Image (cartoon, rainbow, N blue to C red):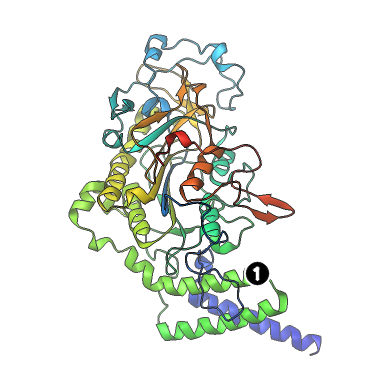
Amino acid sequence: MNPIDQYVNLETRREFLGKAAKGLGIAALSSIVGNAARAATGSSFQRLGSGALGSPHFPAKAKRGIYLFMSGAPSQLDMFDYKPRMKALYDTDLPESIRNGQRLTTMTSGQARFPVAPTIYNFKQYGQSGAWISELLPNTAKIADDIAIIKSMWTEAINHDPAITYIQTGNQIPGRPSLGAWLSYGLGSLNENLPTFVILNSTWTGRKEAQALFSRLWGSGPLPSQHQGVALRSDGDPVLYLTDPHGVDRNMRRAMLDGVNAINHELYEDFGDPETHARISQYEMAFRMQASVPELTDLSDEPDYIFDLYGPDSRKPGTFAYNCLMARRLAEKGVRFSQIFHRGWDQHNVLPKDLPNQCKDIDRACYGLITDLKQRGMFDDTLVVWGGEFGRTIYCQGTLTEDNYGRDHHPRCYTKWIAGAGVKGGQVYGETDDFSYNITQDPVHIRDLNATILNRFGVDHQQLSFKHQGLDLKLTGVEEARVVEEILAS
């Protein structure tokens, strides 16, 4: 074939792909996670339930996971890490012996002083462990015996973007696979008609300005793109272009897809690009999702008592409560890992105005999710994780008054909780000093947390890797990470 004819042939193929993509909604569905595909003989697609590991390294406690991520960094001092001695130190300067030269953000580094700002909220003890929980979380307090509260989390990152990238991907520099992508890659799918990894972004009622969330936070990095997270929308089609356009029926779409797949197989034969296989898998998943996703996202079959359990917001699409109910449905249908992002936790000022709203957004829903999982017999094999990227300072950012204060970023210690899947509920792990500034007992790095999450899925974090540019990439990186065995019952 002469060069001109070859050019025309390739151009026609591109045009066909472009037109077909519009009909299939690939513009939005290109991020779909998939495993099994109706591929031709010879493809290297994974079988349902089979990931790169073949099988877990040891018996898994978790079949699926739900990560409740509070983006912006909740104040541990006002929610979980009770420091009653601070009341007597109101408006005194944070001792240098406590700060000990820690670097500060540019938002407070220029302050003339660092006045201690005790919480204005009351705390009580709950559960077998006597965990101190704030009045801002009355419903979370009811599940104190179901959750393990880790008060000694820490990270090196002090600013939002590197910190959230770090905890999601194991590296402060963008481009690495996210936790959900690693689970999809390593363990494969539980339902061939739904994504393995799903993202739900929530509305919020606290501080209106919030840190941006980038799709790389649930991306697959150098892993095959079929493993990246799928973001479900709360308005219109759950995934863009999921509905057939006017004049296109199911049979026509199937025929179009078969034609696109045939061309992609030819492209693979010509160039050998493994991403071509991933693309075919995504197209097939998109086709199957046309039937599975609308049914999944239709909450009309949920009884009133379930909505009452999660709270009135659970009837409002896009709220945290609605997304928690959706996450339970996803888990029930075989989605291996879902992650709910709730923004607005960055209380640098007017904390007493914004934090109560944030807590109201999530408190009833967290209780509802744990209770719902328990009553359905799913709690023992579903892992639930709650928390943000770092904590907040005991000292006030800006002007301190008796009824108003703000808190800056604090990576040295903060609080998360974890529940289900063989986690020992009713315990508090780790301790901090009187200022909630330094860890005094049982530190847990974010690498340790990720190693523990993988452990619950039967995965040894040291043995789940992917060769890229001459390196064996791992979620926990190359530095030491340990499974926090002390919070595990089995």
Task: Say if 268 sits above or below 427 in the image.
Answer: below
Residue 282 spot, x, y in % from top left: 53, 70
- The relative height of residue 288 versus residue 225 in the rendered view (above or below) is below
Q: Position of residue 26 (x, y in %)?
A: 52, 71
Quarter of the image for residue 90 reads: top left
Q: Quadrant of the C terminus?
A: top left
Residue density around tag 1, few if under 14, some if 14–19, many if 20 or more, within 10 Å: few
Query: Percent from the top left, x then y, of residue 372?
Result: 27, 49
Horizontal side of residue 419 vs 432, given as left or right: left
Residue 429 placement: quadrant: top left
Along the viewing direction, whichever of 11 and 58 lies nearer the viewer: 58
> Which quadrant: the N terminus?
bottom right
**Secondary structure type for disc 1:** helix
Q: Nearer the viewer, residue 294 or 441?
A: 441
Q: Residue at x 51, y 16 (%)?
A: 114
Q: Residue at x 37, y 64 (%)?
A: 236
Residue 486 % position (x, y): 45, 33
Give the quadrant of residue 417: top left
- Along the horizontal axis of the image, is 61 left or right of 157? left
**306 vs 79: above or below:** below
Residue on which disc 1 sits: 274
226 relative to 333 in the view: left or right: right
Of 210 and 173, nearer the camera is: 173
Q: Residue at x 62, y 80 (%)?
A: 265
